[in-house]
Image (tube, coloured by chain):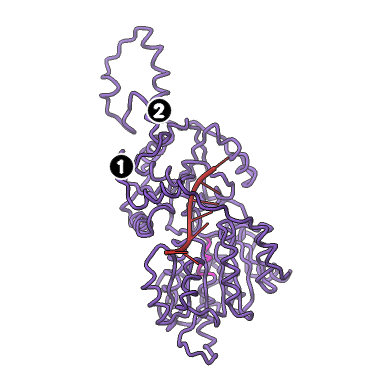
Chain colours: A purple, B red
Amino acid sequence: MPSRRRFKETMSDTQLATEQKPSTAVRFDDFGLAPAILQALTDQGYIHPTPIQAAAIPIVLQGRDVMGAAQTGTGKTAGFSLPIIQQLLQHANTSASPARHPVRALILTPTRELADQVADNVAAYSRHTPLRSTVVFGGVDMAPQTTALRNGVEILIATPGRLLDHVQQKTVSLAQTQILVLDEADRMLDMGFLPDLQRIINLLPQKRQSLMFSATFSPEIKKLANTFLQNPTTIEVARSNATADNVTQVLYKVDEDAKPDAVSHLVRSRGLKQVIVFSNTKIGASRLARHLEKEGIKASAIHGDKSQLERMAALDAFKQGGIEVLVATDVAARGLDIAELPCVINFDLPYNAEDYVHRIGRTGRAGASGDAISLYTDKDARFLADIQKLIKRTLPPLELEGFNPVREVERERRPRREEGAVSSRPARSDRGGYGAPRREKIDPWFLKPYEPQEPSDADRREEEERAAPTAKKPKVAALLGGLGKR
DNA sequence: AAAAAAC
């Protein structure tokens, strides 16, 4: 396997293990990148490439197809963006196209937020070049996107659905696209994007360079790679499904109905100022965010039933520090790059063990240390077993130190009262003190039927979706079988 | 069991 050898030439085994640490031996100026690109890197203070960048940049520059196994936080985006920009600068568009700016590189991502973020990076890396880039995704007005496409872009970043919409409207042509990137390909398969991907790939020239990145190497991913990569070089930066060793993982055993208070307790007792809390459901995320806000913690929810405007506002507020707690569904589990997130909390253990790896991958970015805290209840035993198997280590459920859900307090206090102990302390309800306000009775609000206070657009859509669930998506394996060509 | 993505 020449790919493997090539990688080992540049990377030492220790760098393989530490994954995100920049290599001190290699510098960005070693790759022969254009001065305009190096200037952009200098602007951002980047001197040394991360291992995946050091491995990917020379291979992409050679024009080879790449199958990359890498999670976000490894510097993957720059790993493909920089050599793509270099390629586009180097090889002028020789075709006699009427369009002055045909799309020459197409980058597809599974979520809108990720598309937006990749676009920001590409714009930053190409700002000193004449190359133009833009991003298109759903949930927002099409008109500005159409204008940008009509004006012409060399690099287009997109989510599949909206891109196909633009193709149908004939606002974009992919007939001259030389480079295709599938970012988070495993996620795209999970989300049922395979038919859309196939449609898009059919619009591209046969002769092109294709790059595919995936956090995992499932059989489906391998099959997808076989169908549209040609003699790819494999780049593997970390063992897939490995969790970074700079992330401390803890599991706290909590009663189901004490989970929201456990989150407030964790946020307060640890003084967390930047934390993502993952919920398995959209409604659960909205409710938890409201609960935290009631407790005076600046929180906001982000999930697929929020309008795109709300999603972007929440993410932006979180990045600016206006929001301390971002309560998210798995829309934020992958791809989002929020600098040096010190902590993530799993309000629910994810149903899918791989999602656990992706979620906790939001912390401990770029070599920094991080905490991954998960709340564990009795019904999570099976999910935990799957997770432990995948990450190849055990996570013993611990007691949450200093957290006294009301029910526990009552159980402990009763015998003392029967013994006739007279307390000089004020009644519990009047006591102030650290942490969540003590209540007489637990209010399992999040187990009750959902009653939106002021139904927003997003809330209304939530209810509609529950009333009329969307049709089941076809099995990925079956669709892959239909791809043929092997 | 859920979530995500085009109108």
Question: Is A22 or A316 nearer to us in this picture?
Answer: A316
User: What's the magenta bit mostly, secondary-structure-wise?
Assistant: helix
Instruction: Please indicate whether residue A209 sits to the left or right of residue A283 in the image.
Output: right
Q: Say which residue appears at 58% left-offset and 67% top-offset.
A: A197
Q: Which mark is residue A335?
A: none
Q: Where does the image place residue A275, in percent across and percent down from the top left? A: 41, 48
Quadrant of res A192 = bottom right
Q: Which mark is residue A404?
A: 2
Q: Give the vertical position of A152 relative to A284 (above or below).
A: below
Question: Is A370 or A84 nearer to us in this picture?
Answer: A84
Check residue A351 for magenta coloring: no
Give the magenta-colored segment's residue range.
Answer: A74-79
Question: Is A351 or A453 nearer to us in this picture?
Answer: A453
- Extreme residue in the front direction: A468
Amino acid of disc 2: Asn
Q: Secondary structure at mark 1?
A: loop
